[in-house]
Amino acid sequence: MTSVLIDNVAELTTNDPSIGDGSRLGLVERAALVLEQGRVAWVGRAAEAPAADEAFDAQGCAVIPGFVDSHAHLVFAGDRSAEFAARMQGTPYSAGGIRSTVTATRAAPDDVLAANTARLVAEMQRQGTTTMEIKSGYGLTAKDEARALAIASGFTPETTYLGAHVVAPEFEADPDAYVDLVTGPMLEAARTHAKWIDVFCERGAFDADQARSILRAGMAVGLAPRIHANQLGPGPGVLVACEVGAASADHCTHLSRSDVSDLRAAGVVATLLPGVEFSTRSPYPDARALLDAGVTVALASDCNPGSCYSSSIPLCIALAVREMRMSPAEALWSATAGGAAALRRADVGRLRAGSRADLCVLAAPSYVHLAYRPGVPLVSAVFAAGRRIV
Ligand code: NIG
Ligand code: FE
């Protein structure tokens, strides 16, 4: 297989503090890197670069690790633009909107669902995302959840069973029977296509006891837990995440002080999804409290048809910096290495020898431009596993 030298890089972010300037981003100026067999074979100063079979001239631009988007709901059909428009006129967001997507998703043929997922995956890749998690959660029957996960697994190994998104409409009068389905036959149908199990722990969705038993049922058959926690109000989601040892608690919009210290003590990643607060016009999570307490913070898109129909990690970075007072360096780390931590992946989110060769070339001299130039499509080339995909 041919090796590729990415040359003439003004600023390389490695996310390895033992490389370059010693910061958490491990920045190397006037850098180069060699990709071979889908991995990074070498990184360092351009002047010291070894020979390779092919060269790609980065033309004095910045190179960063490909974004790791650890939270997305891409397998769905239908459109909720009217709900968005109403929300912008004052109708508050609620978990109930999920049901309209469930109706449309159940009615869609497999090829339509797969094509919509492929369209969104391609949209993510064009914006620099090279690893994405994809959840089910708009089927809510054993057959439809398994179908969503089978489609998702065609695009990523990071598939998440979210049968516990909301109680399916048929079970409205008997939510406990729905939990039995989610932890029984639906889990059985879904598990072969899933790596993770997730639950929406929120008023209007599932309470702490239900969330705990759903996550534990998934763990008993080998799925690893993650959770939607503390999105719409304070609640027990973070506590459940810490109790079961979830990889990540996602949203974390309404946290108490003890939630923050529990996340830190349990080593659970806090995944912040600022596109949701932007698209639902809600207060942003307190990223500073988390970072200052030493919690590992990830940034992800939560791309979904309801609370945030944006697949853009550059938008999340700009919001994290502008609205949540993260530094540009913190935001970039959280959208790359932080996402990798949320997915317990050591091979992505960094650019050092041995990492997967997933990277973005920016049409800018520094990663800071991701926040400095909001809304501007700065991702000019993307490599995934050493192959140029954009
Ligand atoms: O992460 N919180 C639950 N699920 C999604 C929203 C899904 C929807 O509204 O369709 C979220 O925000
Ligand atoms: Fe979500």
Image (tube, helix red, strand yellow):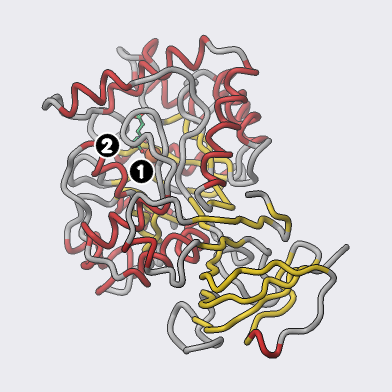
Is there a contact, CB below 8 Å, between mark 2 and mark 1?
yes
Above or below, 383 against 201 in this view is below
Quarter of the displayed picture in which ligand 2 can be seen: top left
Residue tagged by mark 1? 228
Above or below, 161 against 125 in this view is above
Q: Which image quadrant: the N terminus?
A: bottom right
Q: Position of residue 282 (x, y in %)?
A: 17, 42
Residue tagged by mark 2? 202
Disc 2 is placed on an element classified as: loop
Q: Position of residue 386 (x, y in %)?
A: 72, 60
Residue neighbourhood size for the residue with mark 2, other residues' Cα within 10 Å, grouped as few (<14), some (14–19), many (≥20): many
Near-viewer residue (227 or 387): 387
Above or below, 95 against 215 in this view is above
Near-viewer residue (103 or 311): 311
**Quarter holding residue 261:** bottom left
For image coordinates 22% across by 67% down, the residue present is 288
Near-viewer residue (167 or 330): 330
For image coordinates 31% across by 48% down, the residue present is 251
**Quarter holding residue 175:** top left
Tag 1 or tag 2, which sits nearer the N-term? 2
Near-viewer residue (173 or 195): 195
